[in-house]
Image (cartoon, rainbow, N blue to C red):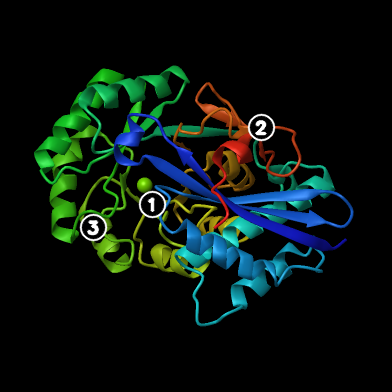
Amino acid sequence: MKIVGIDSFTLRVPTVKPMALDLPEHRLVVTRVQSDTGPEGLGYSLLFGGAGSEAVEAYARHLSTLLIGEDPLFVGRLWDRMYRADRGIRRVGLAGYAVSALDIALWDLAGKVANLPLAKLWGATTDRVAADGSGGWGSYSIDDLMGEGARYAAAGCRYYKMKIHSPEPRVNRQRVEAVRKALGDGVQVMVDVNQKLDVPSAIRQAELLDDLGLVWYEEPVLADDIAGCAEVARAIRIPVATGENHYTRFEFRELIERRAARYLMPDVCRANGFTETLRIGQLAAAHPVAVSPHVVHELSVHVAAALPNASLVEWIDWVPGDLFEGMPRCEGGAFRISDRPGHGISLTPDAEKKYRLNER
Ligand SMILES: [Mg+2]
């Protein structure tokens, strides 16, 4: 079997309110890997807010030239070829997104050839993965927060994650308290700082939330500052979560060794695809940390279901109904792995027409 062509293009997908108050659109850099014997693999990287999609698409096109003519079922070998090319460019940041889009497409193709969903191809531990409903941006009113939390609760979610982005720690506490009260004891809450604080402020903010029984305290400081994150984790009682802005098993090894977090959150569209995210998960399995993949739940459910140490998958309910076919539905607060082979997601016949960015 040989790879005979790879299409790369970008979809620009508008969001609706209240998410649109913070992020009016997202972009997906899509790669479609064609084989000489018929099956195709679909990969994509989701760029929240869309920034950098041009660079990711351009680099994915460059990496594609390394794959043409190769056997797509040697996914690990092709991943290594992409990872080790252009050694002046580390596979972090936008380059990690580009490798991810192609790696995800290669695995999708491998799953289709095997006629198995990826979770089962990888030795599934479960066919059902619980989700935390996530959103709660800083621009949301309290009513927006409560409404969103209630919608996730109605889908059975027992966890709701909201941002704490106000520069005033007491305002953040008031918002979290209001949401907790509105959702009641059946829904636990976690909070996300999104790297906005320095170490002393992150510690002060956590202390102010300490009695609220939060599940975790996410990305307290800049993702670059692993030592700072570890300092926060040592100082506060709420477990720390981080990882959506880390890209390789080497970065995750450092997070683990420094005890910087109790929950690790690799993103399959950033952390060099399924191949590296599975390695990160297996590495974590040898330590007292849980893995809770970041967004793109429709892809990361396969990783979570294949790992022995997965916690929740993050579900941000933003995807319009006319973008994908095969989206898993949340039932009883969890996503079931479907029997569709590969990752099970395809673009609708109209998705390209409606969302594809014009060729430049
Ligand atoms: Mg986050």
Q: Residue at x 48, y 47 (%)?
A: 27
* Label 2 near ligand 1 (CB < 8 Å): no
Q: Quadrant of the C terminus?
A: bottom right
How busy is the neighbourhood of tag 3: few (under 14 within 10 Å), some, or many (20 plus)? many
Classify residue 157 by image quadrant. Answer: top left
Q: Nearer the viewer, mark 2 or mark 3?
A: 2
Q: Vertical placement of 173 versus 29: above or below? A: above
Q: Are marks 2 and 3 in contact (CB under 8 Å)?
A: no
Separation (CA) of disc 3 from disc 1: 12 Å
- Residue 238 place in picture, x, y as percent: 27, 45
> Which amino acid type is shown beneath numbered disc 3?
Val
Q: Is residue 27 left or right of residue 68?
A: left
Q: Nearer the viewer, residue 280 or 40?
A: 40
From the image, tell me which residue sits under label 3: 232
Q: At 60% from the left edge and 53% from the top edge, which residue is drawn?
A: 9
**Quadrant (top left, top right, bottom left, bottom right) of the N terminus:** bottom right
Name the side, left or right, on which 280 lies relative to 169.
Answer: right
Residue labelled 3 has its Cβ within 8 Å of some atom of ligand 1: no
Outermost residue toward the bottom? 88
Disc 2 from disc 1: Cα separation: 32 Å
The residue under label 2 is 326
- Along the line of sight, the residue nearer the viewer: 323 or 170: 323
Q: Secondary structure at mark 1?
A: loop
Q: Nearer the viewer, mark 2 or mark 1?
A: 2
First in sequence, mark 3 or 1: give its number. Answer: 3
Q: Residue at x 19, y 28 (%)?
A: 177
Q: Which mark is residue 262?
A: 1
Residue 254 visible: yes
Amino acid identity at mark 2? Gly
Q: Nearer the viewer, residue 259 or 334?
A: 334
Query: Which quadrant of the structure image shows residue 222?
Result: bottom left
